[in-house]
Image (cartoon, helix red, strand yellow):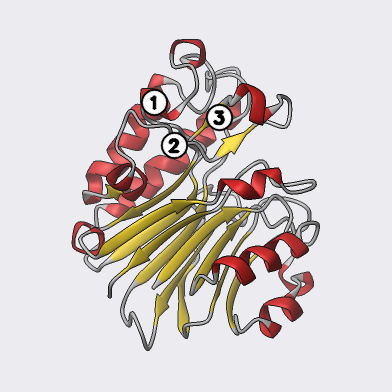
Amino acid sequence: MKIATWNINSVRLRIDQVERFLTEQAPDVLCLQEIKVAEHLFPHEMFERLGYTHRAICGQKGYHGVATVSKVPFVECSRYDWQDNGEARHVGVELQGEGKGLIVENVYIPAGGDVADREVNPKFGQKLDFLARMTEWAAKIDRPTLIVGDFNIAPLESDVYDHKALLKVVSHTPIEVETLGKFRDAHGWVDLGRQFIPAPERNYSWWSYRSYWRQKDQGRRLDHMWASPDLAAKARAHHIIEETRKWEKPSDHVPLITEFAL
């Protein structure tokens, strides 16, 4: 089973790119973040045509939003408001049929603004609180679970192009890394990206629109696929589909795919 995650940065704007990705890579399940569309306006037709007939959409107008689409039957099992303000940032599904019982959690963690200080930047505090609520939830998990999405944190020194230069930049600050580490430890999550591409090997999933990414390669690893330990043992391969960043008017993120032998 191939499960993919991708911050698409507007699913309607980049629907042709999603179709190309699905046609070329053919994942069984795709988790999208930052779909930027209300649920009733989600572009169902293309997914239906390609056989992704099972969909769980948690969206809102113009901002945020997540969607999980699948060829494999599933039932939606959760929508957590870890932001505590009603923003559409999570949806969880339980697979049926092949992979029956596997929980796939799709999350879009807040970026956290530009200043790494909750006193002067409330968005940064919201990000840390979001992670704290996720950590409380993770401590209670008792089933094989895969959590994927845009975590908006690059935790390791080798997850960014310049560790020292980014220590005070939101997404790589020590407090964010520490807070994400508490979430990891609450369930014993296995970071599949680093299981298959061990540090310090290059492993980026995001490049700013502000720099010429192919020349400078100023990337960060903000997107993740983390698995329960017993599920991680069934992972067989992990891929970064970096070529999508070369497509015309691309998302600033690229897709990740993990293959499992379930």
Residue type at numbered disc 2? Asn
Residue 18: x and y in percent read: 68, 63
Q: Quadrant of residue 25?
A: bottom right
Residue 217: x and y in percent read: 59, 26
Q: Is residue 176 above or below residue 48?
A: above
Residue type at numbered disc 1? Ser
Gap in angstroms between the C-alphas marked 3 and 2: 8 Å
Residue at disc 1, secondary structure: helix
- Residue under the image location 52 percent in, 18 percent down: 117
The residue identified by callout 3 is 219
Left or right side of 94 for 169: right
Gap in angstroms between the C-alphas marked 1 and 3: 10 Å
Q: How many residues crowd mark 1 within 10 Å: few (<14), some (14–19), many (20+)?
A: some
Residue situated in front as seen by the camera: 226 or 76: 226
Q: Which mark is residue 158?
A: 1
The residue identified by callout 2 is 203
Left or right side of 236 for 224: right
- Residue under the image location 31 percent in, 64 percent down: 145
